Amino acid sequence: MRIAIPNKGRLQGPALQFLNSVGIKPLANDDRALMVPTSWEGVQLVTIRTEDIPNIVETGAVDLGITGLDYVMESGADVEELVRLDFGKSKLVLAIPYSWNVDDVKDIPKDIKIATKYYNIAKDYLERKGIRAKIVRISGAAEIMPSLGAADAIIDVTSTGTTLRLHGLKPIDVVAESYALVIGNREWMRSEEADKINLVLTMMKGALNARGKKMVFMNVDDKDLATVVSSLPAMLAPAVSRLSNSDAWEVVTVTDENDLPEVIAKAKTAGARDIVVVNIEKVVK
């Protein structure tokens, strides 16, 4: 099976890191390679322009693709959103020069030029908002276009707004929200690779479920067991097993990393000792 990933850009690094956490690791690091074997037998990575991935997935040439929701929306490709990922969060915004004395979309001058590589999204947005503007279709950096005089404003993706500010632009309206996701062909369940695809999706979800979670082991004397167990969080319930040749118990639970200090403090106060914390690679539900 084939998984399409971005060949460059803001999603490439996080996509590769995510696949590594799943256990799908590329076996070559040549940037020129377009098809890369992985540590999973029979699974290849195909490096494609991020914006092309939705259309390639729709054709069935690849089984899965990692891209941004903004590119799926722009392409209009008929693909299925299979897994929402926890990176690539951004906003598609309408940004105008700071020099404009405008704080609301309805006050934007008429017949302006707006530069964007998101032509279809921009066209739909401008029609919904009743904004009269000419769309200047580009494929490169939009932020420089007002400075060059090629456009008056832009519609582009931003994560922190820093690049916009550096170019004297301010966001005035959110056009759409975006995030990274795994997409598949609508007919993927009928594919010869359906079982393998389903396994990959299961492992992807397992890796996401494990993000920010820790497994905690501790020893507890018999007299303190009920108090310790009642103080612990768990996905279902803490696991408890008696230690051999002892009146003590081993207690195992899972907690969010942010709650870890409080969990440990409560457990120790309740009588737990020998507390060990380990990372979790996957939680398969």
Image (tube, helix red, strand yellow):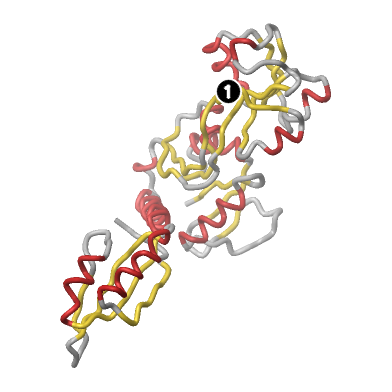
Q: How many badges with numbers are in the image?
A: 1
Image quadrant for the C terminus? bottom left
- The outermost residue toward the bottom is 245
Q: Left of 191 or right of it: where is 38?
A: right
Q: Residue 172 lies in what quarter of the image?
A: top right
Picture residue at 71% right of the left edge, 18% below the top? 136
Please tell me which residue is depicted at 69% across the width and 18% down the height of the picture.
114
Query: Dot 1 surroundings within 10 Å: few (below 14), some, or many (20 or more)?
Result: some
Q: Nearer the viewer, residue 172 or 1?
A: 172
Q: Percent x, y for residue 89?
A: 53, 41
User: Is 175 placed above or below 182 here?
Assistant: above
| Residue at 29%, 71% in the rendered image | 267
Return the x and y of residue 55 as percentages of the image width and height.
54, 33
Q: Position of residue 27 (x, y in %)?
A: 59, 64
* 48 shown above or below 37: above
Is residue 230 depicted above or below 223 in this figure? above
Q: Please give the name of the residue rendered at 62% of the width and 33% of the height, measured from the top-left corner.
A: 157
Please name whichever residue, 120 or 94, is drawn nearer the observer in this view of the structure: 94
**Is 179 left or right of 122, judged from the image as shown?**
left
Q: Name the amino acid, label 1.
A: Asp
Q: Is residue 47 left or right of residue 218?
A: right
Q: Picture coordinates of residue 116 (x, y %)?
A: 67, 24
